[in-house]
Amino acid sequence: FLPHLVASLEQVEETYIMVKPDGVQRGLVGEIISRFEKKGFKLTGLKLFQCPKELAEEHYKDLKARPFFPKLINYITSGPVVCMAWEGVGVVASARKLIGSTDPLQAEPGTIRGDLAVQTGRNVVHGSDSPENGKREIALWFKEGEICQWTPALASWFRE
Ligand code: GDP
Ligand code: MG
C-alpha cells in the first residue's frame, strides 16, 4: 500500500455543532467556536437562531420516548442557539472528543463540557454522533445557500 493512496481514501466528513441556549446566555460562543478553529477543522456554516419547537423535536426524535424529552425540548428552545457546520477528515469523532461526555461531571478536563459545565441538562454544546447524522442535522438546521464552500489559506499548514 502506497501512503498517498491510503491518504486519498480518508473521507472528509461534516458535523453539526450547536452552542445550546445556556452557552449563548453565558457568553461561551467565542470560546466554543475557538476550540474547533484552533484544532484545525473548517467552518462551513454559522448562524444565531431561535429554534422552533418542531425543529427541536425532529432533531432529537430518537430521544422522544425518554422521560427527559419535554425538558430537553424546553431547554433547546429557551433562547437562541448558535448553529455550526464543520468539515474535515475525522471531524465527527474528534468533535465528540473535544466536546466530552454527555454528563459534564464525567467529561474529562480539557473538553468543552469538562471545563465549562456541571449538569447534563445544561451541557452547553451539541455534536453529531455519526457522519450520517452530521449530514442529516446540517440539512435540518441550514437552508440551501447557508453552507459556504471555501479553501482556508492555511489548509496546507494543517494537513500535509
Ligand atoms: P449527547 O450526544 O452527548 O448530546 O447526548 P444524547 O444524544 O444522549 O442526549 C442529547 C441531549 O439530551 C444531551 O446533550 C442533554 O442535553 C440531554 N439529555 C440526555 N440525557 C439527559 C438526562 O438524563 N436528563 C436531562 N435533563 N437531559 C438529558
Ligand atoms: Mg446525541
Image (cartoon, helix red, strand yellow):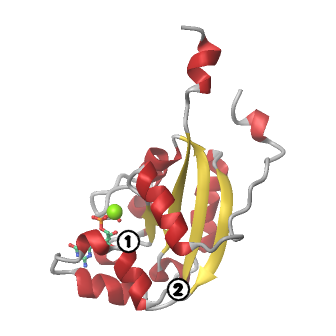
Whether residue 101 sits left or right of residue 135 in the image: it is: left
**Quadrant in which residue 142 is drawn:** bottom right
Is the C-beta of the residue carrying label 2 under 8 Å from the nearest atom of ligand 1? no
Residue 153 picture location, percent across and down: 84, 45
Q: Amino acid at mark 2?
A: Gln
Q: Alpha carbon of mark 1 to alpha carbon of mark 2: how far?
A: 13 Å
Q: Quadrant of the C terminus?
A: top right
Q: Is residue 144 above or below residue 76?
A: above
Ligand 2 shows up in which quadrant of the image? Answer: bottom left
Q: Residue at x 24, y 72 (%)?
A: 63
Q: Is residue 15 above or below residue 155?
A: below
Residue 26 picture location, percent across and down: 52, 81
Secondary structure of the residue carrying tag 2 is: helix
Q: Is residue 151 above or below residue 11?
A: below
- Residue highlighted by disc 2: 25
- Residue highlighted by disc 1: 123
Is the C-beta of the residue carrying label 1 under 8 Å from the nearest atom of ligand 1? yes
- Nearest the viewer among 106 and 1 is 1
Q: Return the residue found at the far right.
A: 153
Q: Residue at x 61, y 50 (%)?
A: 87
Q: Amino acid at mark 1?
A: Asn
